[in-house]
Amino acid sequence: MTKILNKTESIIALGSNIPSKHGQPAQLLAKALEKLDRISEGIPEASSFFRTKAEGLEPGAPNFLNAVVVITLDDDWSPIRLLRVLKRFESELGRCELTGDEKYASTHYHSRAIDLDIITYGSSKIDLPGLVIPHQRALNRTFVLEPLAELRPKMIFPGSDKTVSELKNALLVLKNTR
């Protein structure tokens, strides 16, 4: 990721597989992109929407619609501030958190109206409770690597010596051999 004139690029992954009162998954992703546009200092770069299989969720969970967006933020932003804003956006778009015993269900993952994850924040490496950057599972997720490869195929993913395209292709081969 690059740092340009006191600005930092951040990669955000978006996902939705159930509607909320704010719309269907495609509408929710579009609304999330509008919100991200409002905080970005430049014109955000958004990938196409990718339909992906819901893996590791409750039986019969609908497929996800996923995308990746690259936004540019002034240096007065911090990764923690960005995380708080993303959580607010999720809430505004109808994401409901699990509570009580549901948190401890057999699956950690669940269907959601909207999910916004920080994948990278410039070249920052952060390991805090609730925030790890680069995102610790991004390299194992085709729903992150495929849209990111559309935008930044030659980018060397932080913490790796491989390009996003190389990582995506290796993951696809691995998944096809299972």
Image (spheres, rainbow, N blue to C red):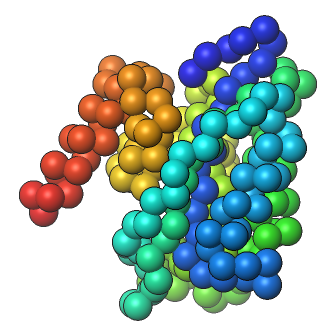
Residue drawn at x 25%, y 47% as measured from the top left: 171
Can you see residue 21? Answer: yes
Residue at the spot x=43%, y=66% of the render? 51
- Vertically, is 8 above or below 137? above
Q: Is residue 80 above or below residue 142?
A: above
Q: Position of residue 5 (x, y in %)?
A: 78, 8
Left or right of 16 on screen, residue 178: left
**Drawn side of residue 19 relative to residue 108, left or right:** right
View extreme (left): residue: 177
Q: What is the x, y in percent for residue 169? A: 24, 41
Quadrant of residue 79 within the rendered picture: top right
Pick the quarter of the image with the N terminus.
Answer: top right
Q: From what the image shows, is residue 104 above or below residue 134?
A: below
Q: Is residue 103 visible?
A: no
- The quarter of the picture where residue 106 lies is bottom left
Q: Quadrant of the C terminus?
A: bottom left
Residue furthest right in the image = 76
Q: Which residue is nearer to you in this view: 117 or 148?
A: 148
Instruction: Name which residue lies at 70% across and 60% down.
Output: 30
Task: Count the numbered circles shown.
Answer: 0
Residue 123 location, quadrant: top right
Q: Position of residue 90 (x, y in %)?
A: 76, 64
- Pick whichever, 84 or 71, lies toward us: 71
Of all residues, the one furthest to the top in this rendering is 5
* Residue 25 in picture, x, y percent from top left: 62, 73
Task: Report the front residue among 158 and 4.
Answer: 4
- Residue at image x 44%, y 23%? 155
